Structure formats: C-alpha cells, structure tokens
Image (spheres, grey):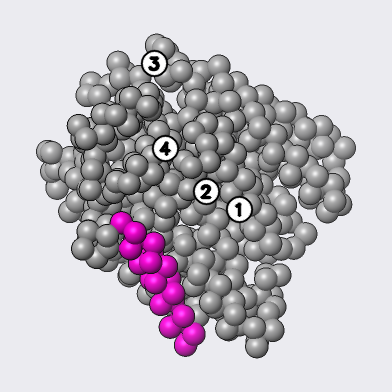
Amino acid sequence: MNGRLPVRFAILIAAEVFFCAALNFSDDWTVPQMPVRFVGTAFAAGIAFLAAVSHFPPKLGLRRQAAIFWGVAILLRLVALPLTPSDELFRYQWDGKVQRAGLNPYLIAPSDSQLDGLRRDFPEAVKINHPEMPAAEAPGAEVLFRFLSGISDRPLFYKIIFAIGDLSIAALLLRLLGGDECFRAAAWYAWNPLAVYSFAGAAHFDSLMILALVGGIIALTKASPDPQPNELTSFADPSSRWVWAVVAAACFGIAISLNIVAASLLLLFIFALRWRAFVLALSLIIPTVLSLPFGFPQVRVWHPLGQINYLSRLNDLFWWLIEDTFWPNPHQRSFHYVPIIIVCVAVVSLLFIRDWRRGMLWALAVVLVLSPIFDPWYCTWILPLAAWRRAYGWQVLSITIFAYYLFWDEDRFVLAWHAEPWMRALIICPVLAALVMLAGQKKGMAEAT
C-alpha cells in the first residue's frame, strides 16, 4: 500500500470534520450572507467527504477499519449537534403538543384561534412553516411526535434520537453489505455531510423511516428465495424464511407509517417474497392501526398528505425542463404530477421483476427525480440504497443539493423561492459530469478485461 495514502486519507477526514464543524458559524440564516457561507462550507465538506471515502485504505485490518469508520461517523454527528435545527422540528413539537392537549392535528391547523393558549406556552410556534395547514406527516410520525413531546422539548433531545437512528442505519448497512470492503462502502452513507446535517443538525425525523426500510431490506434478503452469495444476510435457514418474511413486512409497514414514500417499493417487496408476499398484508395493517387514534376512516387521516401537492413546486429536478419547453405550468402546481409518478414507479418495478435489489434503487430514484418538490433531506432516503448498489451519482447530488439553502438568501433571486437556471446548473451539472466520468471508467475497465 502506498505509504502516503494514510496521511492523505487522514488529512481528508480532518478536512471534512473541520468543515462540518464550521457550519456552526454560518447557521443563522437571518443574517445577510450567512446562507451563502453555509452552502460554501457544506460544499467544502462534501468535496472532502467524496475524496476521503475514495481514499479509504482497503488493506487495513477489519478492526482498524471499524475504529476509523465509527470514530469518524460519531465525531461528525457530534460536531453537528449544536447547529440550529430546521423549522420542521417546531412542527414536530407542535403536533405532539396538540395531541397531548386532546386535539387532532389532522383537523386543526396551527393558526387556528382555538390554539392561542397553546401558542403562548410554545414561543417557537411563530416559526412553524405553513401554519394554515393541518398535519401533513403520516400517522406513524404523528404518534412518534406525541411520544417524544411527552419526554422533552429540547431540540438536542430530538437530534440525539434522530442521530442514533442515523447511526443505526449505518450499522444495518454494514450488515447488508458484508465482505471485506463493507466499511468503505458504508462510509458513503455514514460520512455523508447531508445525512450528518439532516438528522444530527437539522433534526429531521426521516432517519427513523430509513432505518425501518433498511431493516426491512435486510430481512428481505434473508427471506428471499434467490440469495446472493456476496450478501452475508442471504444465508438464512429455509425454515426461517417465513419468520424473516414477517419481519420484512413489519419493518416495511413501520416505514410506510412514518412516510408514505416507502410504499413506492411495495411491488418490489412482492417480487422478492414471491408466494410469501401475502404477509405484506401486515405492511398495510400497521399504518391502518396507527391511523385509528386519529379517527380513521371517518377522518381522512391520509388526505392531508395530499395537501402538500397543492403547494407551489420547489427545486424539482425534472419538471422544470418540461414546463419550459412544451408543458407550461404558470401556477407552479404539483398535484397533477402524482399519477405520473405512480405509473412510472409501477413500470420501473415491473422492469426489475427478476432483480428486486437493483429495482429498489431505481424505483426510489424515479420518485425523487420526478418529485415536484425536492427538499435536500429527501435525498437521504436513497443514500443507503446508493451505497449498497454503488450508485455514486447520488453521492454527488447529496452534496450539490446543499445549494437549496441559498433560497434563504432571497435577494439573490428574481422571484423568492423560485430556482433560477444558475442554481439548477449548480445542483444538476456536477451530477451529470460525474455520471459521464463513471461511465467512462466502467467502459475503460471493461475494455481492459
């Protein structure tokens, strides 16, 4: 092994930790120029991350690899904990308090005058986004918010919970990957600045949905009748496959309960389980049971999820190109894209009927690429799958998507919260360039063999 490689590797790790820590000096976006500094610092952390994982020493012993892997993963999240949380956290806390006050968050919006007393006891209520809308998260998430709000109101508490979920994803990913290079492959997720910031920094709860989904995929590899030799999780006793099928269905149901986007993988779960797929009824029972406390089916509990589709589009990756050419959308509405997404996910899933592992990545990719609203933490949904399937283009997007936070510097846009061509280029062009480079490398390797 090149003697200089560990030194270079250590410098790159130190650089990523330094830049992630430096985000703490530019996280007050009410101050002019702070969003620009935040994005620039995040880009620097991302470049260091991409280089560090690419230089992960492959010939270190597994114990040393494990120590480096977990040491860096934990340190990155520790330096992110002091960051200012996103305004999404205040909505989580608010919905939990509304439930503890005996009210239904799906029936009453934060701006309702009935909640004036609750607002006085919760000063952060003024920071809630879209206060005119009732709850828009899935029932499982609302149950979670009620539980957490009964323990503590401190943002640090939420961050620690979501960061623990994030680190648990990394642990499951190591199990899913297996082999001598599992630490390097899993580092594409565990060291990713977007994952670090989204959960330990901004306090988004999505890490718990991803955790349930990855757990379901691991159970799926054990239950599947077509195991892959390179997966340590694949060698399950045939008599235990029923148990793993039930575990997969339960994890999948929990994931759906936390975020409806997990349902985009339903067909692929069916293909993986084959004749055992009827256990996926459990995946529908769990969300239904968690909906009952909110009055389902009399109360349209899942309906508020659709209200988001009536918001103006934001930061999408694809539809802006169509609308600027032959399908105008002057009011920038989103709802009419949902049926298209559903059909495309179904078609892509059917294309991978014999390779559900690859299909998982492609189905979720379709959801993200065709999503009319693309917030940065959405990208974390696919990062464990991208690490599993070695889809490095998503790692590049996870860095360039930090440009989204420039929206807080509204003076730089002709229309507030409307992405302009330069911003779209900043997010998309590096990803396209990376895909071209990766394709060239694969072609060169194929010719060499």
Q: CA distance from mark 4 to mark 1?
A: 24 Å
Of the two numbered discs 3 and 4 on the same chain, state the one appearing first in sequence.
3
- Label 2 and label 4: CA atoms lie apart by 17 Å
Q: Residue at x 35, y 67 (%)?
A: 288
Residue 18 position, x and y percent, is 66, 24
Q: Main secondary structure of the magenta part?
A: helix
Q: Amino acid at mark 1?
A: Ile
Q: How many numbered markers are drawn?
A: 4
Residue 443 vs 21, above or below: the answer is below
- Residue range in magenta is 274-294
**What residue sits right under mark 4 in the picture?**
93
Q: Nearer the viewer, residue 250 or 180?
A: 250
Identify the residue position indicated by label 2 in the image. Answer: 207
Q: Nearer the viewer, residue 149 or 225?
A: 149
| Residue at image location 14% in from the left, 47% down from the top | 327
Reading the image, the residue beneath label 1 is: 169
Secondary structure at numbered mark 1: helix
First-in-chain label (2 vs 3) = 3
Mark before the other along the chain sequence, 3 or 1: 3
The amino acid type of the residue labelled 2 equals: Ser
Q: Secondary structure at mark 4?
A: helix
Q: Nearer the viewer, mark 2 or mark 4?
A: 4
Mark 4 residue type: Gln
Q: Secondary structure at mark 2?
A: helix
Q: Nearer the viewer, residue 297 or 335?
A: 297
Residue at 43% x, 47% y: name it.
146
